[in-house]
Image (cartoon, rainbow, N blue to C red):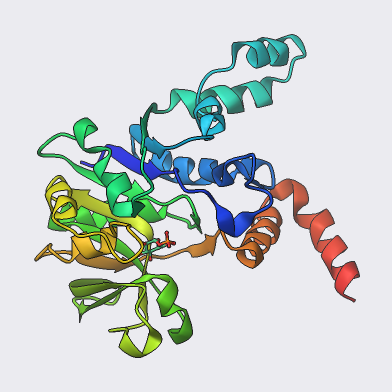
Amino acid sequence: MIRTAVIPVAGLGTRFLPATKAIPKEMIPIIDKPTIQYIVEEALDSGIEHIIFITGRNKSAIANHFDYHPELESHLKETNKMDELKGVRELVSRARFSFVRQNEPKGLGHAVLCARHLIGKDESFAVMLGDDVIDAEVPALRQMMDVHEEKQVPVLALQKVSHQDVSKYGVVAGEYISESLLKVSGLVEKPKPADAPSDLAIIGRYILSYKVFRFIEETNADGTGEIQLTNALSQYHDIYGLLFMGKRYDAGNKLDYLRATVELALKREEFREPFTAYLKNLLK
Ligand code: G1P
């Protein structure tokens, strides 16, 4: 059973400047929820009970967002805003939240390593990246947990991307064992299109075993001084990739962020009709 999810949130968010100068990129909302809340809700809806944020300087808004707020709660009660009250309380009560500081900017592999003392030696756990917001009928992480429960091996989320985009991702080679499941035989972080072993990109969801911490320790930093998680994962002999069902948005990319805002708004009952009418009128 996977009960713990590690969510690295220490990044500076330079792709989203100037918005991220004074607020964490994870707190930028899509409609009315910070992007990080979409990730946490996916975890909770998948059955995760403990969330470990790997955090850094200037990220205290994230800790506040996942904590009770007595003053706000009494105000909501007094003004009879019961739905809002339920919303803010429920999010916090559904899991335990832990915070570990990553005090050196040494990459995603190093961020995951910072959670080691909170993970059991026999435990497998999830890693979820805050930029990848996934809209799916069955939460993407749940789909991966189902594969893990059956096969008892690490699982990566995969999606086919356009050939010129492979250089933005970790890319895998492997053999299909069913329509949506791949046994991974090789991994490369951000290859040039000409060197990529496939167009199958790692999307920010991973199920890993405790062993990964040793693999990360044995991984050298790359040219930029970062320890890449993808390079550490190359040491697994038995690791699977799942082409999950769902739509993924890169919330750190401004155009994709706009798409997410429009498409997720159109899915909300309260906005569907007036927002569709507005868009039709605008584009006519
Ligand atoms: C990270 C990983 C990369 C993965 C990507 C998914 O890259 O290093 O392997 O494909 O997340 O979003 P980043 O986007 O942090 O550069």
On screen, residue 45 versus residue 174, left or right, reads: right
Image quarter for ligand 1: bottom left
- Residue 198: name its quadrant: bottom left
44 relative to 130, above or below: above
Q: Is residue 95 visible?
A: yes
Frontmost residue, 28 versus 89: 28
Q: Looking at the image, which residue sits at the far bottom?
A: 194
Q: Say left or right for 158 vs 215.
A: right
- Give the number of marks: 0
How far across and how far down the image is residue 191, in percent?
34, 78
Residue at screen point 58% across, 59% down: 15
123 sits to left or right of 101: left
The C terminus lies in quadrant: bottom right
x, y (%) of residue 76?
71, 16
In the rendering, at what x and y percent does residue 94 appear?
A: 43, 27
Q: Which x, y percent locates residue 234? A: 17, 66
The residue shown at (19%, 75%) is: 186
Residue 108 in the figure: left or right of residue 213: right
Question: Would you place residue 200 above or below residue 226 in this image?
Answer: below
Of 169 and 184, nearer the camera is: 169
The quadrant the N terminus occupies is top left
Image quadrant where residue 171 sits: bottom left
Vertical placement of residue 160 versus 124, above or below: below
| Residue shown at the point (43%, 86%) measured from the top left | 163
Residue 46 visible (yes or no): no
